[in-house]
Image (cartoon, grey):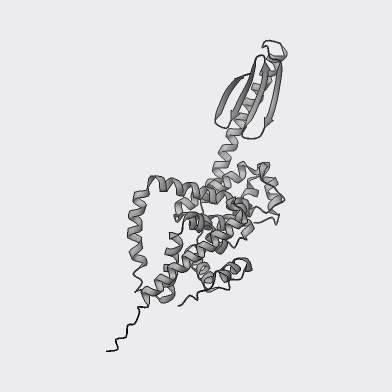
Amino acid sequence: MTSGQSDGELVLRVRVGDLDALGELYERYKGAVYRTALAITRDESVAEDVLQETFLRTCTYAHSIDENLPLGPWLYRVAVNLSYSWSSRVKRWLNVLQETFDQWVVPTCRSPEALTEEREWQQALMCAIDALPDRHRTVVILYYLEELTLKEIAYVMDLPEGTVKSRLYYAREMLRAHLDEQERRLIPEVVYDFT
Amino acid sequence: MILHSRSDNQSRRDLTDGRPWHGELDAMVRSALLERVGRATPSPTTWERIRTRVERRTVRERTFGMFWIMGRYILQRVWQAGLLSLSTYTESWRCPQTVWVEWRFDPYFGRIMAGEYGFFFLRLAF
């Protein structure tokens, strides 16, 4: 049951150890935090861990959260940082395995015969999004999936707004190039022989 | 499905136009992301795990807090009784996770940092 209190009021209650208030914030934001972590890490169990850690940190650092601001961007910031930490750890230690994994995954992306056209494009696009560098992919996820503004993304990623804009622009260009290539592959060029 | 190519200026404009998604690529990106994780929900047990961890931590902090109050009382008494040649005793900062106690006895400046996981002692010479 929700109390209808604002985020700020709930944060004030969390500060004095009110677990029900933390539970209410969890209910409000669990979907968004989990989705973001899952989109970045692509691993359900890691996304669960990120979600758990994000709310533990909310409890720990409740005294330093500005209760006059919406809590969402603060939570995204923690979740993105935790997801990044996990990604960089995994990349450091499992780089070779990751490459092997990619080699297995790529062929499935390129054999879409059994899929409908829409799903085929969707899958091609997801492959393209996955192939983006982390810093670009996170911007894409926050902008398109979570519908954050450029300003909010700048806060979440601790970057100037111009940098966010530029990353989004280059991410779109990379996705467009990937899809153009996919299109060329699916619609083979017709060669007329006028002899 | 054909992606209409646009000039760079057009693409840059799209970024500031905001929502809803007018470009074909924008709509496709959003739809692909939603398809993958839009309906994803965390396990129903996650909240219980968070709750348990917070409760455990609260018990640990209360225990720590009790020892801290006792320790501070003893240290103050010892200082007041002049058993230690401390010239200054300052409880400088406190929050649920960390406590600092600072005191000064020439020529040293001492600091005890007590955290969630134990006590640390720093002695800095000036």
Left or right: A121 in relation to B122: left
Which quadrant, please, contains the C terminus of chain A?
bottom left
Point 58% across, 69% down: residue: B9
Is residue B43 shown to the viewer in this render?
Answer: no
Q: Residue at x 68, y 50 (%)?
A: A10
Where residue A118 appears, as percent x and y from the top left, is 44, 75
Residue A91 position, x and y percent, is 41, 48
Is residue A194 at least partly visible in the picture?
yes
Find residue A76 and report its horizontal and vertical position in percent. Answer: 58, 53
Q: Nearer the viewer, residue B45 or B104?
A: B104
Counting from the top left corner in percent of width and height, residue B103 is at 67, 20
Q: Residue at x 57, y 44 (%)?
A: A56
- Looking at the image, which residue sits at the far top? B83
Q: Nearer the viewer, residue B102 or A172?
A: A172
Which residue reaches farthest front?
Answer: A195
In this rendering, the answer to whether B124 lies above or below A16 is above
The tally of labels here is: 0
Q: Is residue B70 left or right of residue A123?
A: right
Q: Is residue A16 above or below residue A79?
A: above
Seen in the image, is A7 located left or right of residue A98? right
A75 shown above or below A148: above
The residue most toward the bottom is A195
Residue that appears at 61% across and 24% down: B112
Q: Quadrant of the N terminus of chain A?
A: bottom right
